[in-house]
Image: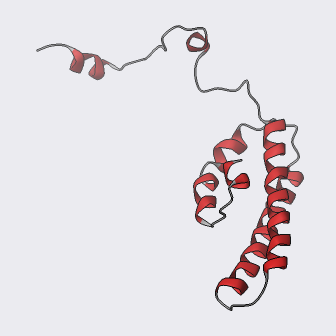
Amino acid sequence: LFVAFNKVCTAQYFVWYLALLPLALGQLKPTVSKTWLLALGVLWLSTEGLWLFFAYELEFEGKNTFIELFGASTLFFAAHIAIACTFIANYDWHVSAVNDDHRKGAAPKMKMGNKAKESKKCK
């Protein structure tokens, strides 16, 4: 949501959250349609491409594309919100890498091999 609501939009912002996308996809409920996720991906790529096209025309070609860029920005923002709503609504909040004891306040249980136990002993 930070990227969607930020007043500055650059391509660098997409790199850091695209790296987290596989982790987030793994936490989605199985009820979410793969076709819907693919459609959201196409929507995001097309609106980003449209935005980048008009931004390029403005910055490098010196063309007056402010109105078109505003429209592309609005579509790009809407695509971000659609993706965020899909992930929030379909995220499996009960899946966790932390064991149940840790959630109850107990310290997490660590399993050590024999070599790790031996290296902890004072010599």
Say left or right for 25 vs 31: left
Q: Residue at x 71, y 78 (%)?
A: 55
Say left or right for 98 vs 44: left
Q: Residue at x 64, y 43 (%)?
A: 23
Instruction: Give the vertical position of 30 relative to 93 (above or below).
Output: below
Instruction: Give the vertical position of 113 relative to 7 (above or below).
Output: above
Q: Is residue 42 visible?
A: no
Q: Residue at x 76, y 31 (%)?
A: 92
Q: Residue at x 87, y 59 (%)?
A: 39
Instruction: Give the vertical position of 61 relative to 89 (above or below).
Output: below
Say left or right for 5 vs 19: right
Q: Residue furthest left?
A: 123
Q: Position of residue 33 (x, y in %)?
A: 88, 46
Instruction: Count every numbered label the image shows and give the total.
Output: 0
Q: Is residue 118 visible?
A: yes
Name the quarter where the C terminus is drawn: top left
Q: Along the line of sight, which residue is nearer the eye, 53 or 6?
A: 6
Say left or right for 90 vs 21: right
In the figure, residue 79 lies in which quadrant? bottom right
Q: Position of residue 52 (x, y in %)?
A: 72, 76
Q: Position of residue 100 (x, y in %)?
A: 62, 13
Q: Position of residue 10 (x, y in %)?
A: 63, 66
